Image (cartoon, rainbow, N blue to C red):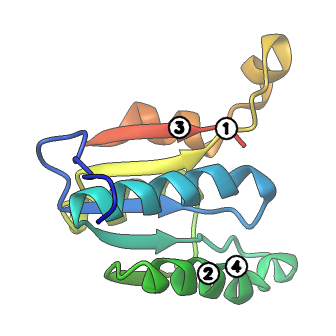
Amino acid sequence: MGPIQICPMSKLGKLLVATDRSVFSEGAVREAINFAKKCSSRVYVVSVLETNPEYETVGANVEKVMETAQKEGISVEALTPIGKPHEVIVEIAGGRGVDLIVMGTYGKTGLKKFLMGSATEKVIGHAGCAVLTVGM
């Protein structure tokens, strides 16, 4: 028998992992799956499509996340809505009663971070639930 896994949060029935199809999302996916295993959580994988044909290759990334979660016995649902990423992520989390949003971060610092902003920072400011940010 393996080590006992304990859920680090008292209520984590549903979590949402947002991926932007970049390497910066890999840490968030990894940690979301770890939390889901420990807490028997349902996982929503969200990859928001902006209205740009360049972003329409989202399917392969979401399928990879779903396969990984399913191999771990995790209940998973993929969503690929169109819109502004931070708005869509907050809306989905609220509509599905998500307890935790897990997102990657680029690790920008200084003036570059201040001027550019990011979907992660906007989600943190508007989400009605906890948000876990994960670096690569």
Which of marks 1 and 2 precedes in the sequence?
2
Which of marks 3 and 2 precedes in the sequence?
2
Across and down, in percent, residue 71 comes to 48, 85
Q: CA distance from mark 2 to mark 3?
A: 19 Å
Q: Quadrant of residue 128?
A: top left
Q: Quick one: which residue is furthest to the front in this view?
A: 1
User: Mark 2 — residue?
Assistant: 62
What kind of element bears circle 4?
Answer: helix
Viewer-closest of 86 and 106? 106
- Residue 94, disc: none
Which quarter of the image is occupied by the C terminus?
top right
What kind of element bears circle 3?
Answer: strand
Which of marks 1 and 4 precedes in the sequence?
4
Q: CA distance from mark 1 to mark 3?
A: 7 Å
User: Mark 3 — residue?
Assistant: 133
Across and down, in percent, residue 62 comes to 61, 81
Q: CA distance from mark 4 to mark 3?
A: 19 Å
Tag 4 near tag 3, CB within 8 Å: no
Tag 2 near tag 4, CB within 8 Å: yes
Q: Is residue 53 positioned above or below 104 on the image? A: below
What kind of element bears circle 2?
Answer: helix
State the residue at coordinates (46%, 50%): 102
User: Number of callouts in the render?
Assistant: 4
Which of marks 3 and 4 precedes in the sequence?
4
User: Mark 4 — residue?
Assistant: 61
Residue type at numbered disc 1:
Gly
State the residue at coordinates (50%, 70%): 46
Q: Is residue 135 positioned above or below 16 on the image? A: above
